[in-house]
Image (tube, rainbow, N blue to C red):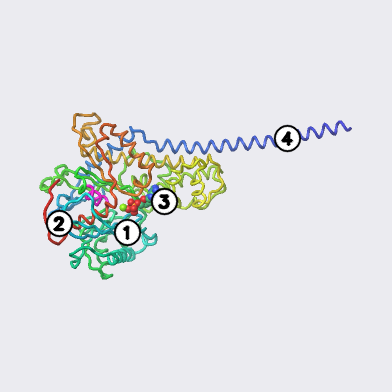
Amino acid sequence: MGGKLVFGVAVGVAVAACAVAAVVVGRRVERRSKWKRVLRILEELEAACDTPVKRLRQVVDAMAVEMHAGLASEVIQVYHVYAAVWGHFRCSYWVVLLFCSFSLFRSEKGTFYALDLGGTNFRVLRVHLGGQRSLSLKHDVEMQPIPQNLMTGTREDLFDFIASSLKEFVEKANDPDQLAARRRELGFTFSFPVKQTSASSGALIKWTKGFSIEDMIGRDAAESLQQAIDRIGLDMRVSVLINDTVGTLAVGHYQDPDTVAAVIIGTGTNACYLERTDAIIKCQGIFTTFGRMAINMEWGNFWSSHLPRTTYDVDLDADSPNPNEQGFEKMISDMYLGDIVRRVILKISQESDVFGPASTLLSMPFKLRTPLMAAMHEDSSPELTEVARILEDILEITDIPLKVQKLVVKICDIVTRRAARLAAAGIVGILKKIGRDGTSGIAGGRSRTNIKLKRTVVAIEGGLYTSYTMFREYLHEALVEILGEEIALHVILKPTEDGSGIGAALLAASYSSYDTVSVDNSL
Ligand code: ADP
Ligand code: MG
């Protein structure tokens, strides 16, 4: 009897132990299969974002071909403003091409002002010109973030805010301009697609970068600013309306005549380059007095089937206020990179429990901003403390193991690497179009000819490029990969500080209604 009981208990214990072991093993198997699923999502992301040099070259070619197509398309208007020439035309994706000649920088003296309305920040600048072309332009600048509510409010609210910041800036400082009694000249950098109608006027075509102020569409940006300036009683004249690429190219070219293009990689992305006037097919015979013209490409709207698109990009685009637009920008720029990463983390959290209980914050669009994503990507601490802190503070994801934190870093890396490499391909696309990529241009294919390599400078601006080291490094690496080391040696990416705003002041000086001294015809 006693033996039977002992036997029975032993069997019971063994069965229970087996059951526990089965549960433990089962859970382990389940965990492993969930982890496998997570890894599969990561692998799929990596494959979909892959940018081997072959693909990048296809993007380069597509960009150069589109640029050619743009130059052949219909010219809508040509403007003669002072001695410079402006005009624009429409093509498949370049919304507006704007010409301005930098050949007319005059030896203007005095103090000129600029307003730079980017996507995130707003800058007010004062630039002092001493009458001689100078490599270092003296300037004062004040920067502040654009209040979120003004991005989607009314036209008047936005411009009243800008005008009052300008007034404060002007009144606070001791204006060293001896000619201060005269009406001040203001250059306005307004970095949204505009239908330019003269050097100092242009109507907004559409908002980008998260702005949405309905009553502004079709309205003149410079006029809206001028009205707000008048309302506030400031004696200033908006004498030039440009976007950030044109301003950056103006400063770049002013300081280094080998500058052939300007690229913005900030909240949004865009580029501008100098084109031979005789290459602008529809303009032949019109611009004969100018060697080259600056063309605003609006490349944020570039699209090609060669761009590596993921389901996350498709969803981001569909949820955006401007679906099917700004496709290149949505893969590259600061406004979107953090959100792509958030979408991948969300997908993983829906398919597994590696991020713990569902976080509602993770479902909120744009909750993870790119600078924080960059901070996670660049976290070099062994315990990834910054990753843990940001996940907890921003997304309320807590207590996740190190291997899951590493997964987050890897997602950031994949998304940023693709963005940077595509931006590099865009830059080489421009170089190819203007014959500075070491090949014999579009028709010549890839063969290196005996083309003499010229020093080629691309001015570059924007917080994503200047503040995100890994992004910058990936971009440079891809540039060398695409061009080859020998050619890449001749291509210099030159960051300009506040170039987009300083360029507006410089062009305001050049378009000044006051006396002019001389003409520099270096182009
Ligand atoms: P914009 O002129 O479009 O307002 P800026 O050139 O002023 O842009 O740069 C601001 C942008 O740079 C913002 O979108 C900001 O999030 C981004 N930024 C700033 N620092 C970093 C960083 N460390 N990593 C990534 N992006 C950054
Ligand atoms: Mg800017």
In the rendered image, which residue does mark 3 sit on? 319
Q: Secondary structure at mark 4?
A: helix
In the rendered image, which residue does mark 2 sit on? 81
Residue 343 vs 142, above or below: the answer is above
Task: Give the number of the disc on residue 276.
Answer: none
Identify the magenta region.
Answer: 244-252
Residue 269 in the magenta stretch? The answer is: no
Measure the C-alpha gap from mark 2 to mark 1.
Answer: 30 Å
Is the distance from the Cβ of mark 4 to the nearest ligand 1 atom less than 8 Å? no
Quarter of the image holding residue 191?
bottom left
> Of callouts 4 and 1, which one flags the residue occurring earlier in the amino acid sequence?
4
Amino acid found under the numbered disc labelled 1: Glu
Amino acid found under the numbered disc labelled 2: Val
Counting other residues with Cα less than 10 Å from the Cα at mark 2, is it few (<14), some (14-19), or many (20 or more)? few
Q: Position of residue 347 (x, y in %)?
A: 49, 44
Counting other residues with Cα less than 10 Å from the Cα at mark 1, is it few (<14), some (14-19), or many (20 or more)? few
In the rendered image, which residue does mark 4 sit on? 17
> Of callouts 2 and 1, which one flags the residue occurring earlier in the amino acid sequence?
2
Task: Give the number of the disc on residue 142.
Answer: 1
Is the distance from the Cβ of mark 1 to the nearest ligand 1 atom less than 8 Å? no
